[in-house]
Image (cartoon, grey):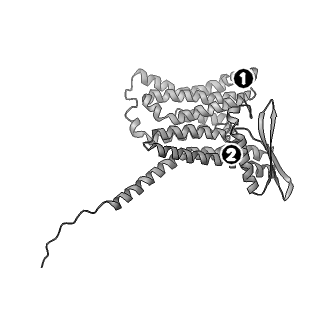
Amino acid sequence: MAFAVPFIWLYYLHPGSFELMWKGRTFQLFFIWLIALELILDWEKLQTSKITKLFSARTFAFIITLALPTIYVWISNYLGLNAIITDVARQSGVQWWDLMALAIEYLVFAVFYCLIVLLSFGVKGLKSFSVPLFFLLVVGALYTIDNLYPYGQFTLFQFLVPTTTTLAAAVLNLMGYNTTLTTQTNPLQGTLPLLTATDPNNPVRSATFAVAWPCAGIESLLIFTVVTLLFLKRMSISLKAKIGYFAVGAAVTYIINILRIVAFFPIGMDYGVESEQVKLFHFYYGPLYAITWIVAYPLIILGSQSLWRKLKNRENSRTLPMEPQPLRPNPA
């Protein structure tokens, strides 16, 4: 509830921001889902470490901390904090200065969330709720990095993009398109792969996109890595199983990112590369595919483990020797 209230308030103030995955607030809804998932999975453990005294310094601090997210929304939107952050970013030469307030919002919410969990459940509770915390931190950090180093300027995240783009071109070729892959470099955008796809039956039907790391889904790979490793760390399964789960999930996430690039081109051919349809896919549906998979993957892991235990128990019940039945006297 500490975050539901400010999120509803933010929706009232900025409804369009909740229709954007990248550089929007839809990630905050997935954050709420991850909190609910953690509560469901660790409810028995958390009951033993929650606040028990009604009148104490810890309880008083906890109540104040619960209000901090809502207070921050009030200060940032009504007392000019967002305007101050925006002005400082613009004067500092940040290219995406108008989006810095949103990035800071994610990071501030992560700090408040950490305080709430610490005061409510202690250090052990913070370990149990680490997935939502790092989810917010990673999203806020990625937004900040892209604001400071947009397009392909942040080379650490850009190194996987050429390979991902090459594989996307291969998929487009299998779909029957002709593709051309080159590289463009300029001071504003850095070095970016430039992919062109053309319909061989209609050469006019063509689309060209420069691919930066947010377009290639590098952010989803980073979020997947953090969320899945933290989740697997808490599971009492073998190291071999953990490696297998992580490898399978990472492969599926990477494939989704390849298909994410591929999907841009039919949309761009039909509606134009600068169309609203392309922008909608770029900022919402493209990231939504990967994030939906990432937040659902822990449930898939739990489901597969439950199924494996049932199959194993059934197999063991079949292999156990039958107990000898006592002999009954012959009535004759």
Kindly identify the residue that appears in the image at 39 percent across and 31 percent down.
49
For badge 2, the amino acid type reads Gly
Q: Position of residue 297 (x, y in %)?
A: 54, 46
Taking 307 as reference, is 172 left or right? right
Q: Position of residue 276 (x, y in %)?
A: 77, 45
Mark 1 or mark 2, which has the lower sequence index? Answer: 1
Secondary structure of residue under mark 2? helix
Residue farthest bottom in this picture = 332
Q: Vertically, is 229 above or below 325?
A: above
For badge 1, the amino acid type reads Ala
Residue farthest left in this picture = 332
Kindly identify the residue that appears in the image at 77 percent across and 52 percent down.
266
To which quarter of the image does residue 250 belong? top right
Q: Residue 286 carries which label?
A: 2
Q: Residues within 10 Å of mark 2 (few under 14, many from 20)?
A: many
Q: Is residue 227 visible?
A: yes
Foreground residue, 74 or 163?
163
Gap in Å between the C-alphas at discs 1 and 2? 28 Å
Q: Position of residue 146 (x, y in %)?
A: 70, 32
Q: Which mark is residue 150?
A: none
Q: How many marks on residues?
A: 2
Secondary structure of residue under mark 1? helix
The residue that label 1 is drawn on is: 89
Foreground residue, 250 or 11?
250
Foreground residue, 218 or 127?
218
Q: Vertically, is 111 above or below 268?
A: above
